[in-house]
Amino acid sequence: MDRPVSPAPGRWPRPPAALPHARLDEPPDGARVTVAGLVLVRQRPGTAKGVVFVTLEDETGVANVIVWAKTFQRFRRAVIAGRLLRVTGRLQREAGVAHVIAETVEDISPLLDRLTAPG
């Protein structure tokens, strides 16, 4: 199976291609990016006014995702039940930490079944 060609230095995969989490420091603040990974943590603090915080992990590291209440309502099932998610949104940096502000959330958990498929 052919591996995708890495983009030139200084460029990043544009949506819908997923950006490896280790490269979240490359796109400029406010860039539209897509990340994908296993859901490690979902947090919905009572004081967060409906905001859900999701931590995704890929083979290169973790990505912090913020899902505002309005977006959560649109993608509720994926945010709650997904084990493997693809999230597209705007990159936000604050105090040296990168967050993806979710615009779309897709449950791609069925792809996990391919990991154990023969061949």
Image: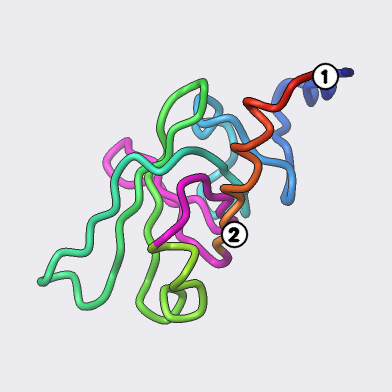
Check the image and tell me how it is coloured: rainbow
Determine the residue positioned at 73% across, 42% down. 17
Q: Secondary structure at mark 1?
A: loop
- How far separated are the C-alphas under marks 2 and 1? 23 Å
x, y percent for residue 71: 46, 75
Determine the residue positioned at 63% across, 47% down. 110
Residue 58 sits inside the magenta stretch:
no
x, y percent for residue 68: 37, 71
Give above or below for 78 relative to 22. below
Q: Which residue is mark 2?
A: 106
x, y percent for residue 55: 35, 44
Image mark for residue 3: 1
Looking at the picture, which amino acid does disc 1 mark?
A: Arg
Pick out the residue farthest to the front. 118
Front residue of 51/109: it is: 109
Which part of the image, by quadrant, shows the N terminus?
top right
Residue 9 shown left or right of residue 29 in the figure: right
- Marks 2 and 1: CB-CB under 8 Å? no
Residue 91 sits inside the magenta stretch:
yes
Q: Main secondary structure of the magenta part?
A: strand
Residue 93 shown left or right of residue 46 in the figure: right
Question: What's drawn in magenta, residue-wise?
Answer: 81-104
Determine the residue positioned at 66% across, 40% down. 18
Looking at the picture, which amino acid does disc 2 mark?
A: Glu
Give above or below for 69 relative to 92. below
Residue 51 shown left or right of residue 30 in the figure: left
Q: Earlier in the sequence, mark 2 or mark 1?
A: 1
